[in-house]
Image: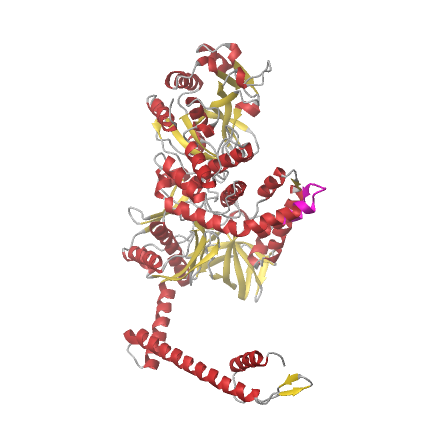
Amino acid sequence: MMTSDEVRSAFLKFFEGKDHKVIPSSSLIPQGDPTLLLTTAGMVQIKPYFLGEAVPPNPRLASCQKCFRMTDIDSVGDTTHCTFFEMLGNFSVGDYFKKEAIAWAWEFVTKELELPPERLRITIYLDDDEAFNIWRGIGIPENMISRMDAKDNFWGPAGNSGPCGPCSEIHYDFGADNGCGKPDCGPGCSCGRFVEIWNLVFTQYNQNKDGKRNPLPRPNIDTGMGLERVASIMQGKRSIYQTDLFVPLLDRIAGISGKKYGVSEETDRAIRVIAEHSRGITFLIGDGVVPGNDGRGYVLRRLLRRTSIFGRRLGLEKPFLSEMAKVVIGKMGKAYPEISKRQDFILKVIEMEEARFQQTLNTGLELIEEILGKNGEKKVISGKDAFKLYDTYGFPAELTEEIATSRGFTVDLDAFEKEMAKQREKARASHKFEWADSAIAGLKDKLKCEATNFVGYDSLKKKASIRALLIDSESAGTLGDGQEGGLVLDNTPFYGEIGGQLGDTGEIIGSSGHFQVTNTVHGPAGIVIHQGKVNEGILTVGEDVEAMVDAERRFDIARNHTATHLLQYALRKVLGEHVQQRGSMVAPDRLRFDFSHLTLLSEKELKEIQYIINAEVRRNHPVYAEELNYRQALDEGATALFGEKYGDTVRVLKIGKPPVSMELCGGTHVSATGEIGYFLIVSESSVGAGLRRIEAITGREAENYIDRQFTELNRIARIVAAPVDEVPGKVTGLVEELEAEKCRTLALERELSKQAVNALLNQVEIIKGVNILAGKVDNARPQMMREMGDMLRDKLKSG
């Protein structure tokens, strides 16, 4: 018997004894790998070492990596499959290869774990005779080794490109009594007798995006052993849910729901799914994922809502998931301290999302029942109905499908996708594109230009040659007086709009013409297009000109851009490490910064953020850029935008020595933080679930803003005849007086209304049994007339 903690510790200690460096688990969000949505294997953080993009801390590495895969979500609830799992792995970066990997794997499972050799079966790739001979060499009988095809014994890559290679697996045999009894039953049989516990990948190739494989200069070893499966074997259990990793979770959900585990298979599966999903939900949020409508956010939202649906099957109509997360954190917080550190954030995200879903769940479930009843004969939910459930009630199509399947229905997913496509098309049609967006489309072939050489980091003025001219998106030989168009130079100091920073303005002057630049954009293939108008004369392709950026405007933009870097630093310091940039806009007069966070920022938090930034401004830190290898930059702690594709060499913008901020950034900045002058937050708001926005100003605009505020304050001080520092008290007193006067006026009007009503009632005549009142009221406000009407109606009853 070994606990899961003991298995984890034994594995890492064993490979530490084989000269491996034990490295901590990386985040479930793969940093800097846009080919992957989430970390799906232990080798994800090793991939840059295999590709030679970075130097490993040691050629031999070992880890216990937290992983997440959605591919097995429909199988969750059986004895072995998970969305979240722990992967034990040992890695060789160009050091040892098959011989050592196989020998050490066999030593660990038979000596350290003391698994009976006769219970173990080996699989290899079809033509991997080298692996076959090594296994035979350590004493494995030939009939205990199976050759399998690429589906089972060729691994990778993680994503659509990267390292890959043949593999060899170790399977555990639960015995003939637990199998199908067929003569050919073996590893790969679906009867459940055999379970894979360790996959040894011999990484020999790098696969390109087109599927072509090239041999790696030095082959590598990448292994993966599922902790949950090994724990079940070591604890003598047939199911991972009977291990110490899951029993506390099963007990808690059984306690919350009042349902006993082990009585009904339908109830048992719901309990198992909730227990399993609770782990994934906790760890995803702990690593900074927040619920959303796409990407990682959608994965988390789907998991949360799927768990809520299974909770309903247990009769749980009130939120319960935060209780499950507490159990996960209590059980696994020691091995993964980040979830203990971020417990408050994790619980808050769960509570908010679960409450949001609960509001629409009842209505959505009622609608599903209505749809099922309507389609009782066809047993099909249409794509239109599935889309309505998604669009109006937040039901992912997969959830609708799961509910429908449990009732013997299917969902027309093809028609659902067509409805989704229609919605996306509507969104595109409603979007207003500027000239810049339409003008640069399809220009690559028309311009036939090389990429523009940008020199604007060091200079705002540059002699250059005109490479191309554009009129209405078409190439032109000349651009004359009064004409609007685009201009492409061989070299330019103008920054083209990209990455949230607005493009430069200024002027381009030739010997026979003057071009006023009103905007600069990035076109295709690195071409920078200067947009504007010829003020006088004529410009010709091939002509030499001088390009001059509007320096004051550029400096205003630079102040705001550097301030966004300090803002991200301050937000993470005040709110927590979960804060991630989700977008930004840097203009000369303001900056806008969107970031992941759940709740409204308090006045205290905003003041603290502003104080931290201005403290760093006053320290006058140097601001400087360095070009580094991408992996080196990340290893040094540079922040990258998740999902952004970067090249091998990146520009890292650093603030301070040692840096208080390091970000991958191609924008323009001040040379020292003191040049920002002053940073002032002007607004904070929500722009979506789990997404906040701060707008702020710096430098000249901050000075103008403060000047306007003080001018207004002094004007008010003169009006109320009080010194500036006494204005708040004086205004409060005046407001209270006005409110009191308003109350007195209303009371008087009500009394006058009563008197007027009584006078009118004396004028009521009864004609043929009907009360008739005709009268005139002078000097009454509309509100007073409404009140009198109500009084008369109440007194007359009918009339």
Indicate the position of residue 495 as horizontal and vertical percent values: 46, 55
Q: Is residue 416 above or below residue 147?
A: below
On screen, residue 46 versus residue 478, left or right, reads left
The N terminus: image quadrant: top left
Residue 223 visible at all: no
Q: Residue at x 38, y 35 (%)?
A: 331
Tell me if residue 224 is in the magenta stretch.
no
Could you say where residue 109 lies in the image, as x and y percent from the top left? 41, 18
Residue drawn at (66%, 39%) of the image:
409
Q: Quadrant of the C terminus?
A: bottom right
Q: Position of residue 532 (x, y in %)?
A: 53, 62
For residue 614, what is the image quadrant? bottom left
Residue toward you, 21 or 178 = 178
Name which residue lies at 50% across and 38% down: 35
Work out which residue is located at the far right of the displayed protein and give it: 377
Q: Please indicate, yes or no, whether residue 469 appears anywhere in the rendered image.
A: yes
Up/down of 194 relative to 248, above or below: above
From the viewer's side, name the closer residue of 693 and 547: 693
Asked which colour scheme the image uses, the reply is: secondary structure
State the image quarter where residue 534 is shown.
Answer: bottom right
Q: Position of residue 101 (x, y in %)?
A: 42, 20
Q: Is residue 32 above or below residue 13?
A: below
Span highlighted in magenta in the image: 372-387
Horizontal side, residue 599 vs residue 71: left or right:
left
Tally the marks: 0
Of residues 796 and 551, the one drawn nearer to the viewer in this rendering: 796
